Structure formats: C-alpha cells, structure tokens
Amino acid sequence: MKLSFIWHMHQPDYRDANGIMQMPWVFLHAIKDYYDMPWMLARHETLKATFNITAPLIQQLELYYHHPEESDKFLALWLKNPSSLEEDERKWIIKLAKSTQYETMAKPFERYVELYNQEHFNNSELMDLEVLFILSWCGVYLRNNSSIIKDLIVQKKNYSYEDKTLLLNELSNFVSGIFDYYAKLQRDGIITISTTPLNHPILPLLMDMQNASRANINTNMPKDYVKLEEDAYLQIARAKELFEKTFGFIPSGFWPAEGAVDESSVKLLHSFGIQWIATDEEILFKSLKTNNRDALYTPYKYEDMIIGFRDHYLSDLIGFTYRHQDSYSASKHFIGELSKIQHTNSDATVFVILDGENAWEFFKNNGFDFFNALYSDFRACSWCHTVRMDDVLTQPSKELSYLAPGSWIHGSFNTWVGHSEKTRAWELVFLTKRDYEHHKDKVNEVIKSKIVEHFLAAECSDWFWWYGDDHYTEFGAEFDELFRSHLINIYDLMDVSAPADLFIPIIKNKSAESFWLKPQSDISPVINGRHDSFFEWIGCGVVDESKLFSTMDKQRGPIQKIYYGQDNQKLYFAFEGKIKKMCLNDTMTIIIDPMNIRGEILFRTAETFIDNLKVEVVIGDWFEVCIDRSKIFHDEISIRFELEKDGKVIQTLPGFGELRMNLGDDYSHNWFV
C-alpha cells in the first residue's frame, strides 16, 4: 500500500495598493508552520510527502526577509512603543492579540492568561501582550532551536522595546531560510514541491461560470457573467514562472485551488506541461457515477493528466478529529483505518490532502506530538509506504473518460458562488471587467499591467469563501475591504470614477452570534424527542452548525443545530438535522472535561450511565440527551459529541471544538423588568 500526503500551504494576498500587508497571517504561519511541517517529516528520514506552496505565499513571505515592519501594517504598529499608539491602533493590536487560540496557544503562557481576558491595558501590560502574542505563534522548531525565543519564553513578563527588536530580527532571519529548506528537501528526494495558479482562483469559474450550475443546478448565478479564460491562462503561466524563479525548477504538478476542476481547466493546465493534479473523492464519484470507495484508491489519467483523488474521511480525521485525542491513540486509529483498506486492496494508493497550516493551532504543541507519533508508526509499518506525487507519476493508472466539474467541498462550487454576497462579489468583478474593456485603449501598457495584477488578485478564492453565511471570521470586514480595493484601484488606474457600489461593504454586519447564541436562562424541557413547545427551550443556547466559521471546511454531518441549556439538576441537549438517517445502531460518544469522562451511547438507548453520570436519550423528530449533573463537581465544563456510523466518526460537535458551560451561571445579568 502507498500513502500520498499533500500538504497545502496558502495565504491570500493581504497587500493593499501600496504593497503593504494589511493582516499578519503570512508572517505568523511562517514562524509556526511553514518550516515546522516539512521539518517534522524530515526528522523521520525515510518518509516522503508533497507540499503545495502557492504563489501569494511566495510573494508575501519574501516581504519579511528584511525590515518586515516596512511591509506589514501590524508589525509596524507592533514595533512602536505602546505609548505612541493611537486609540484605534491599540484596539486593533489588542483584537489581533486576542485572536490566538486560547486553549492550545495562549494557555501555556501564564502571563498571557492573565492578560487575555482584560479589556484595558496600561503600556507595560500591552507590551507584554504584544510579545506574548508573537511568542505564542512560534513553532516547536523555534522554541527548541532558538536561544532568543527560549530566553524570552523563560522571561515570562516585563518585556522591553529591545526585546521586541531582538525578537523581530530573529524571526525575520528565520523566515528568510524557509524556501531554501524546501528546495533542499526536494533535491534530497524527501518531498515534491508543487504550486497553484497564481492568485488561488477557482479556475473552472474563470473558464466558464456555468460550471457552477453544472455542478449544482440550484446555484444562484451572477448576472451578465463574463468568461475570463485569458485570466485563467495568466494565472497558470505566472504561477509557473514564479515557482521556477523561487525554487530553480519547473513544477511537475499543481493543486488546483480548492481542488476545483473541470475538463477545460485540466486541459489548460496540461498545455503548460503540468503532469499531475489532485482533487476530491466527490469529483471521482460524480465522474464514474458510483459511490464505491474501492474505486478511490488508485491514480487516474484524464487526457494524459495524472489525477489523485482525496480520501475525504481520512483527511478530515487529521484536520478536524484528532485534535481532540491523545497523539498515541490518534496515530493508532489512523493506521488502523489504513489497514482496513490494505486488507481488501494491498496495492492501494491512498491520497490524504489537507490544509497544511490552519489545523495545528487547535492541536496541543502545534501538532508536533501527533505527527511524531504518526510518523514513527509509519516508519515501523512494513505494509504501507509514503510516496511523493512525483513517485505516483511512475505508477500504473486507470483511464478516466469524463471529469465532472466541482471542488473539494461537496463536489460543487457553492462555497464561492450562489449566496447573494458571493454572487454580488462576482458581479462587481464582471462589471469592472466590462468597464475595463471599454476604456483599455486609453491607458498605456504599464497601467494595463497594473490593472491585470488587480484583476488576478480579485479572483482569489478566499474573498468569496468569507462572503455568505457558511464561514465566519472576526476579520470579515477587512477581507471585504481588501477585495473591493482591488476593483477600486482598477478604476483609479484608468482615471475613471469608480461606481458607488464598490464603496458599499458586501459583507453583512455579522459576528459569532450568527452561529452561536449563548444561553440566556435556565431551561427544563421534557425529554421526549419532540419539539412540543417553543417555550420549553426558550432561553437555551444554540449552535448553528450550518453557519459554522472556519478557515477550513469538512464534510458536514447530519446535525445542523445544537440546542443546549441547564437547570440545577440536569444538562439538556437537542440535536436537529437529518435525524431519520441515523440508524439505531449509530452511536454518539460524549466527552466531558476536565473530568476526563468519555462514554458511548446508542441511539436506541433510553437510559444509560457514562462513568457515574446518568444519561437519558430519546430519538424522534430530533435527538435529545439529558445528563444528570449531581455528580459533576466543577463550576465549568467543556463538552463535545462525536457521531459515529459504521465505525467512522462522521461529525464532531460542536464543529468549532468544545462547548463550554458555566454550571454556576444564574443568568441574572439577562433579567429585566
């Protein structure tokens, strides 16, 4: 058996018209993930993998090699003495410093915990918060190999301006060597490096927007769309050129942004000499008109292009499920899942493809413990060998006569077009393109070149990802402004007044409350599997999984909403969704911390015990669970649920991690008369 890992490293283009980074995520992931991920693999010598590095990441990472504060809005403010910051600058710094994942990244720093929940900071406290924010993003390699990082972590508090400058200089030097390290591992045969079209666009939508309706007939299409085939060509050509300039060789393969493919875009990629691509299993199943998973575990060839199809379940285990498990158990489980495939197909080639940067902030120790366990198990495994995509090129493949259009999310394009906000963003692109075609003869070649850059940047998939109600980020307004600024700049370059619509935010004024409403009062509903009365759940908390935010995505499970609450005797949970599809043999695992309780219930169970906690279960129009709290002696607990079907975890709830419940909350702050 062969296992092909593809780790996708990508950030959207955060630069404004002056080339200044408006958000610091490229820098932060550089010091935490971009070196650590290949380093964790290389430590285990015989293992191999593929790393996909996108063009915007290459272009932006280079800005941090020398004097990064000159190219990054955040670092410029961060490097200032807090006493010289304007009030709005202080607020923005604090907002970013509090965006760190609390449990896994902030909590290990005692001083960070002290400051994390404060609302106001004196200058000394803000200095500590700023330094600790950066230290919390330093990866395992830096923490173990940089004496400067080690000393600053040991110092714990009372940081100075000199500490800041020393830290930034150390990190800048570190970042400047990341791509050299990748190139060395490629030369050593440990990794394959690939890339993605220039600005991470959804190529099939550029080639023909009708691909959206072909993949899903219910998609709300943009009005008066324009085919952007010339832009698609440039996106590929410029990415290939930049890759060769950076690494010194031509890439053998591309990961199409978001795994988005159609027949025309694959043919276009092949015309550039690209030998392999990868996408999701849903595309294969739609292409073959089958859901037989045995068909998944081999490379395919379409029009001389080798294609690897991603095992969505295995990829999601790493990206979403294993963050909640100890490293040893997670690794053994993953190897066990592979062994099930190997048992029926010893010649299988399994493709595990996922985000290589965003998941690890949810893991303890930035995922190091998990990968150390997993890679150690692979080294000891005699029946499974890791391979690069360059190795896959030499394997036998099956012919594919038809390739269905779609992406790695549900086999459709609805994550990027269809919702009114997403569709509106496309309509503004098309409007700007039509106006450019009308005025382009009046501008010189230098201006045309700048305009093309803005069009290519505006076609990045990330802008459309954050529009709509399927994902949420605290920085949605910033993303919205950056997207529209590219189109506004095109009009400025043409010396044409930009339409007023471009100055109106597309994104609605939404927050985490759009998917997570906290409990407002005690509840004592009757547990009978029916939503008999609106009033019995009034005041409960609600988690809307269908609107859950993430920088990643996964297959959505059957549960769409969670209702929860408590009284002084019990904890109550109700799950709404495709309940009728849950069989009586399906199970739910309940995990409660810090009590370290983990127990399994069957859907047909009426009453059971998890450790010493009595649990009532009723399934009907929706699924209800009631837990006796008399044996819970903690003021605050974290609870989560895992739905399992046919031995596989198909959904982890809540999707954002853990549901914290304050058992001592009397809700009096919500009362009014």
Image: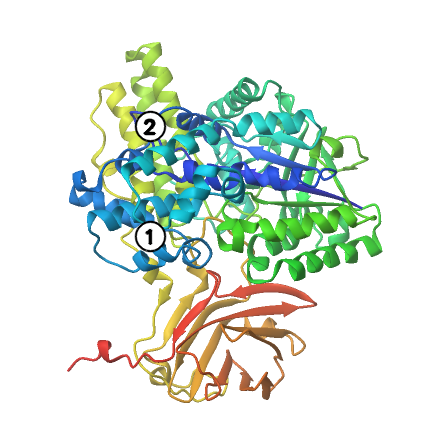
Scheme by which the image is coloured: rainbow
Report the side of 610 relative to 70 (left or right). Answer: right
Q: Position of residue 268 (x, y in %)?
A: 59, 25
Q: Which residue is mark 1?
A: 98
Query: Which amino acid type is marked by label 2?
Result: Ser
The x, y position of residue 566, in whole percent, is 39, 82
Residue 258, percent from left and from top: 53, 41
Earlier residue among tags 2 and 1: 2
- Which residue: 55% across, 40% down? 36
Query: Badge 2 is on which residue?
Result: 71
Of 438 and 551, nearer the camera is 551
Quick one: 31 or 206, which is closer to the camera? 31
Vertical placement of 533 versus 561: above or below? below
Callout 1 secondary element: loop
Rendered position, 315 above or below 178:
below
Query: Is residue 593 shown left or right of residue 474?
Result: right
Numbered marks: total: 2
Foreground: 103 or 171?
171
Q: Please indicate whether residue 649 sits to the left or right of residue 641 in the image.
A: right
> With respect to residue 366, does 434 lie above or below?
above
**Residue 20 lies in quadrant:** top left
Where residue 2 sits, quadrant-wise, is top right
The amino acid type, in three-letter code, at marker 1 is: Lys
